[in-house]
Image (spheres, rainbow, N blue to C red):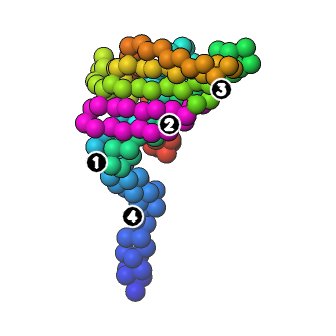
Amino acid sequence: MFFFLSAWMLAGAQTNPEDQNKNQHNDAKNAASSVPGTEYSGMYSFLRDGEFVQLTVEDNARVTGFVSRYGDSESDRDVFLDHFFKSGKLEGNQLAFTTDTVHGVSFEFHGTIKRGEGKKAGDEAYYVLKGTLVENKTDEANKASAASREVTLKSFPQDMNSPQDQKK
C-alpha cells in the first residue's frame, strides 16, 4: 500500500501546474501565429520621435489600432492625441487604414508591410510599413486640406519572451 501511494504521489508531482500553463500559453501563441498577418501586429514609428502606430491584425484580415501623436495646434501643442482606426484591412502584404478625426485631423495610410533591415523577429525595423500617408485637416473655419507624403514606419524592437517566460 505504501509503495502504491508513493508512486501515485510521485506521478501527481510530475504534473506541474506551471508546465501546464506554459503549454497552454504556447498553444495559444501557436494558434495566434497561424492566423495570416498576425506576425505584423505591434508598434511602429510614426512621424516624430515618441509618436507611434499600434497595429493589430485580427481574424479575416481585419486591422485595428491607433496612431498616437503629439498635437500641433495652439490648443493641443505637445499633448498626446490618439486617433483610433475607423477602418483597416490587410490583403496579403497590402495594408490600408483610416483613423477617426481628433482635433480636426485624421490620417489615411495605403501601402505595404515588408521585411525591414532587422535581422531577427523582435529587432527594430524587422517589419516596415511603406506607403502613402495622407493627413486630412479641417480648420476652425471648416476649410479642409490634405497633405500626402511617402513614409517608411519601422517596427519597434520587442522582447519576444512573455513576462512569465522571463521569470523562469
Query: Mark 3 — residue?
Result: 103
Query: Mark 4 — residue?
Result: 14
Q: Which residues are magenta?
A: 82-100
10 Å crowding of disc 3: few (<14), some (14-19), many (20+): some
SS category of the residue bearing label 3 = loop
Residue 34, numbered circle: 1
- Between marks 1 and 4, how big is the CA–CA gap? 30 Å
Q: Disc 3 or disc 1, which is closer to the eye?
A: 3
Q: Position of residue 114 (x, y in %)?
A: 28, 25
SS category of the residue bearing label 2 = strand
Farthest residue in the left direction? 92
For the question of whether residue 6 can be seen, the reply is: yes
Q: Main secondary structure of the magenta part?
A: strand
Query: Mark 2 — residue?
Result: 85
Q: Quadrant of residue 119?
A: top left
Q: Are marks 4 and 3 in contact (CB under 8 Å)?
A: no
Disc nearer the start of the sequence (4/2): 4
Q: Is residue 94 above or below residue 9?
A: above
Q: Is residue 38 above or below residue 128?
A: below
Image quadrant occupied by the N terminus: bottom left
- Between marks 2 and 1, how big is the CA–CA gap? 24 Å
Identified by mark 4, the residue type is Gln
Instruction: Residue 133: say if magenta.
Output: no
SS category of the residue bearing label 4 = helix
10 Å crowding of disc 2: few (<14), some (14-19), many (20+): many
Q: Quadrant of residue 132?
A: top left
